[in-house]
Amino acid sequence: MNFHILTLFPEMVMGGLSTSITGRAMEKGVISVEAVNIRDYSRDKHHHVDDAPYGGGAGMVMQPGPVVDAYEDLCGKLGKRPRVIYMTPQGRVFNQKIAQELAEEDELVFLCGHYEGIDERALELICTDYLSIGDYVLTGGELPAMVMIDCISRLVPGVLNNEVSAEVESFHDNLLEYPQYTRPEVYRDMAVPQVLLSGHHKNIEEWRRQQSIRRTLERRPDLLEGANLSKKEKKFLEGLLETQELAQNGDESDSDPREM
């Protein structure tokens, strides 16, 4: 899979993605990452790519010309017009389902804005997707692009040494990942759950699924609506919910009536 990042700061994205799992995947040739410097397409002798916004306002806006020219030059080299993702808090919030969809592509282009954003005409001409990593504002689109590429890369065959890892991590079946343990067996009087030492794979798998359900209920109950649970697991979840409801009712009955 090939990632192309249109950016004003190529050293930033390449420095981050050339390490750890994505870096090793690049070395093996499983994925490729290319940073295209938008400044190289400026027709200004000082390589300016921004100007004051029409209508007034604070800050500067990236001009459409260098952005569109950078993309169209890339298209000429590739012989096609790949999907272009623009990182913006106005977009859909990126999640694992979107990552799985994007992992099916052969080529992906990430457009990183800066300053007060990019001239709308450039976005209308080249962008196919508007994505966000959260409801907050960052200095530019480079960090969100790196986050998305890291996530998508893990779903590309051959990137992870253990191919099962991408399937069983957080958000698999809309459940958070179960707790993990390693040596030592006892640390500060806290022992590893006995079931994990049993060697009984069926019991271990059942325990892990139950822990995933429990953790999702505690930390991200909103995910449970789309969780893929067996009948036995649904019954386990119902028991957790009943226990949770009893605990809440008990807390309410213990409250001081004078506080009402």
Image (cartoon, rainbow, N blue to C red):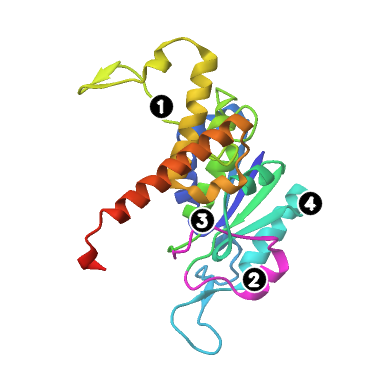
Residue matched to label 1: 180
Q: Which mark is residue 133?
A: 3
Q: Residues within 10 Å of mark 1 (few under 14, many from 20)?
A: few
Rendered view: 104 above or below 144: above
Say whether disc 1 or disc 4 marks the residue closer to the N-terminus: 4
Single out the mark in the foreground, 3 or 1.
1
Residue matched to label 2: 65
The reply to whether the C-beta atoms of the residues labelled 4 and 2 are less than 8 Å apart is no
Residue 129 belongs to magenta span: yes
Q: CA distance from mark 3 to mark 1?
A: 26 Å
Say whether disc 4 or disc 2 marks the residue closer to the N-terminus: 2
Q: Which mark is residue 219?
A: none
Query: What element does badge 1 sit on?
Result: loop
Type of amino acid under label 3: Ile
User: Which picture quadrant has residue 2?
Assistant: top right
Q: CA distance from mark 4 to mark 2?
A: 20 Å
Highlighted magenta segment, given as a residue range:
115-137
Residue matched to label 4: 80
Single out the mark in the foreground, 4 or 3.
3
